[in-house]
Amino acid sequence: MAPTDPRKVGFRLGRRPGGLRPPEQPVEAKSRGRILREPRGTQDFGYDPQFLFNEPGFAQTGHGFAELEPPERARASRRGRVLARLVEAWNQLR
């Protein structure tokens, strides 16, 4: 494993399900990890090659986001987790 910077990092995303009456609470998710000293992986852009995901309880823990295929990354990323929660909230309205 590449050495990591001791700085922890987290990315947070929140969305409010639109069109719900009464308005629901915002749906939020976080991705926690560390900044790598050297980029790893080729699967994405931006910070992904420098972000080591280390949140416990996920199969993706210990991998850089750019090392993961898009479906794997979506299960761990804040965007993918928020989207899954929004779909769940909308499906409960049916």
Image (tube, grey):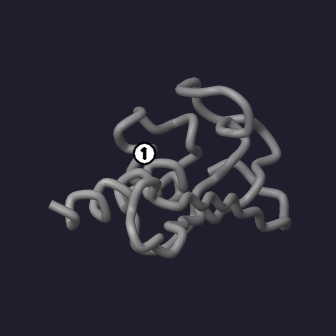
SS at mark 1?
A: helix
User: Which residue position holds label 1?
Assistant: 74
Q: Position of residue 69 (x, y in %)?
A: 41, 33
Q: In this view of the protein, which residue sits in the foreground, 14 or 45? A: 14
Residue 19 lies in what quarter of the image?
bottom left
Question: Which residue is depicted at the point 41% across and 51% down?
Answer: 83
Total numbered badges shown on the rendered structure = 1
Mark 1 neighbour class, 10 Å CA radius: few under 14, some 14 to 19, many 20 or more: some
| 37 lies left or right of 51 | right
Question: On the rendered image, what quadrant is the C terminus found in?
Answer: bottom left
| 92 lies left or right of 45 | left
Question: Which residue is depicted at the point 84% across and 58% down?
Answer: 5
Question: Which residue is depicted at the point 31% across and 64% down?
Answer: 89
Q: Is residue 67 above or below residue 94?
A: above
User: Which residue in the rendered view is the most extreme toward the left?
Assistant: 94
User: Which residue in the rendered view is the most extreme toward the front?
Assistant: 21
| 72 lies left or right of 44 | left
Q: Is residue 35 above or below residue 12?
A: above
Question: Which residue is depicted at the point 78% across and 39% down?
Answer: 38
Q: Tag 1: residue type? A: Ala
Q: Position of residue 53 (x, y in %)?
A: 58, 57
Q: In this view of the protein, which residue sits in the foreground, 65 or 10? A: 10
Q: Is residue 16 above or below residue 48?
A: below
Q: Position of residue 29 (x, y in %)?
A: 54, 65
Residue 85 lies in what quarter of the image?
bottom left
Q: In this view of the protein, which residue sits in the foreground, 27 or 51? A: 27
